[in-house]
Amino acid sequence: MMRTLVDVEQYHFLQRDSVSSLHERLSKGDKIVCDLSDTPQNLDWFNGSNQERVVTQFEDGVKEKKEEYGTKTSRQKYLKNEDYKEFKEAIFVSLPSFPPFNKL
């Protein structure tokens, strides 16, 4: 459950980073160019506008970063996450203490 929450949080950060990256590029005056061949024809309000290009670039950026995140190991995903560390520590502290194995 906690790993799922960490993953959702990371996906949120990926989306935020993608929006920030696009905003930075657009504020510098960069032109957003992409392939519009797969655009549905019934979207008259897009008509190949810059808005559509930005949306496509956003989706592509998020997809790329999600794939990169998906290739990480569990250790890479969760080891440095402070919320996950605190969760694991709270569970460990709440467990009953057991006698050492050599005394059993």
Image (cartoon, rainbow, N blue to C red):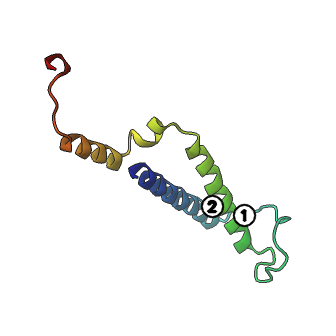
Image position of 91 (left or right of 99) = right
Does residue 54 lie above or below 66 as drawn? Answer: below
For the point 40% across and 52% down, which residue is it?
1
Amino acid of disc 1: Ile
For the point 24% across and 40% down, which residue is it?
92
Position in image of residue 81 (x %, y %): 38, 45
| Disc 1 to disc 2, C-alpha distance | 8 Å
Task: Sort mark 1 into few (<14), some (14-19) or many (20+) by Cα contacts within 10 Å.
Answer: some
Tell which of 103 and 22 is nearer to you: 103
For the point 45% across and 53% down, which residue is it?
4
Task: Sort mark 2 into few (<14), some (14-19) or many (20+) by Cα contacts within 10 Å.
Answer: few
Identify the image quadrant of residue 47.
Answer: bottom right
**On the rendered image, what quadrant is the C terminus found in?**
top left
Per the image, the residue denoted by label 1 is: 32
Identify the image quadrant of residue 60.
Answer: bottom right
Per the image, the residue denoted by label 2 is: 25
